[in-house]
Image (cartoon, rainbow, N blue to C red):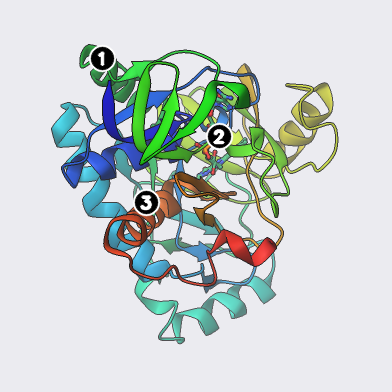
Amino acid sequence: MQYDVLILGHGIAGAVFAETCRMRGLSVHVFDQKREGNASMAAAGLVNPVVLRRDVPVWRATELMTAMRTFYADWERHLGISCWHPTPLVKLFPTANDVRQWKRAMADPATAPFITCQPEPEVDASPLRAPHGYGTVTHAGWLDIPLLLEAHRSSLALEGRLAEREVRPTDIRTEPGGIRVGEVHGRWLVECTGSFSTAQGLLPVKGETLTVRIPGLRLGRMIHGKAGLQPVADGLFRVGATFKWTDLWEGPTQEARTALLEQLWATVDAPVEVVAQHAGVRPAVRDRRPLLGKTGPHTVLFNGMGTRGVMLAPWCAAHLLEHLMDGKPLDPEVDRSRFD
Ligand SMILES: Cc1cc2nc3c(=O)[nH]c(=O)nc-3n(C[C@H](O)[C@H](O)[C@H](O)COP(=O)(O)OP(=O)(O)OC[C@H]3O[C@@H](n4cnc5c(N)ncnc54)[C@H](O)[C@@H]3O)c2cc1C
């Protein structure tokens, strides 16, 4: 079996890379074995082009948002599903200082295109604790990652391009002109294994979220207060997430559940029922930039999606593929060799 690209790992990084290859007419084969702590299955899937602590745009916000929008829209059409939900994000202002910072951001040409300050008829503000009002990030949304990965997995499986198996280093053999995993041969092997990778520069961060029911709360917007609150279905909300740099792989904890509920009660004054708890490990990087590039004559790294995998992956996949196929130099900020 001969393919252009073999992909190891089917989280959002591996899936987006596979789809980017398909759109360029390249054949792919994916290997994936689901493991506890997989980041993509725990993620809320939020896309927000603004760093809300400082009200400044995220790294390359305009480029990333442009690449992301068309990419997921095309992919949805191809798979016949609806998984991208454009949903403005409302930032609650706990102090007068937050209002001043927001006004400064609205006057800044870099941030202004993404934010506004307007009444939100979609938000029932009465149970929200926002003594100084709120502002809105208009270009936000969320991706239903589990739905997208499942649909993509099924389409790969139907075409015989998916092997649900663990790949050990001893399973990989370099050959003239390419690389082999078992019976499958490719020109490139792209490793998209997130926090399970031993790549230099990775600094994995554990995160937990809750799914809660808040009966009667009407929200057509995502909320950023002491807690993040994302409407996912009628009466159901995703709350989170936590950040922890130790005990990465111990799964859901009571400590995180208590912390998230306290943050939630500081954000919304309403009765809450916990429906589910999720834990995963984000493949973050020491300098908060992606990790892309060749690791050998036929091996490649696609990692370091950190806290913003949904927004970063489409731009990163297109950039890496242009490097591999067209010889375009990698942007030094994302080149994995900065950690050699
Ligand atoms: C709690 C939480 C909330 C988050 N919220 C958001 C958010 O709102 N928005 C956002 O953009 N990002 C969010 N993130 C970050 C996002 O989840 C990550 O950036 C992204 O999921 C990383 O994807 P990945 O494909 O690199 O890794 P993963 O999703 O971990 O996928 C790696 C895959 O490789 C497989 N694998 C590994 N080794 C092998 C092997 N040897 N053989 C076979 N298979 C293997 C694993 O089983 C897994 O399926 C969040 C993360 C967490 C934990």
Q: Amino acid at mark 3?
A: Ala
Can residue 89 be seen in the rendering of this structure? Answer: yes
Q: Amino acid at mark 2?
A: Thr
Residue at the (56%, 71%) spot, across then down: 55
Disc number for residue 74: none
Q: CA distance from mark 3 to mark 1?
A: 23 Å
Judge left or right: residue 297 versus residue 114: right
Element at badge 3? helix
Looking at marks 3 and 1 on the same chain, the residue that comes earlier in the sequence is marked by: 1
| In front: label 3 or label 1 | 1
Q: Residue furthest front?
A: 176
Can residue 125 be seen in the rendering of this structure? Answer: no
Element at badge 1? loop
Judge left or right: residue 110 versus residue 194: left
Q: Say if 291 sits above or below 63 in the image.
A: above
> Looking at this view, is 276 or 136 the one in front?
276
Q: Position of residue 53 (x, y in %)?
A: 65, 65
Q: Say if 272 sits above or below 307 in the image.
A: above
Q: Which residue is mark 2?
A: 193
Q: Which residue is mark 3?
A: 317
Q: CA distance from mark 3 to mark 2?
A: 14 Å
Judge left or right: residue 46 versus residue 80: right
* Mark 2 close to ligand 1, CB under 8 Å: yes
> Looking at this view, is 185 or 337 the one in front?
185
Looking at marks 1 and 2 on the same chain, the residue that comes earlier in the sequence is marked by: 1
Q: Amino acid at mark 1?
A: Gly
Residue at the (51%, 22%) spot, across then down: 215
Is the residue marked by circle 2 packed among few (<14), some (14-19), or many (20+) residues within 10 Å?
many
> Looking at this view, is 103 or 197 the one in front?
197
Q: Which residue is mark 1?
A: 160
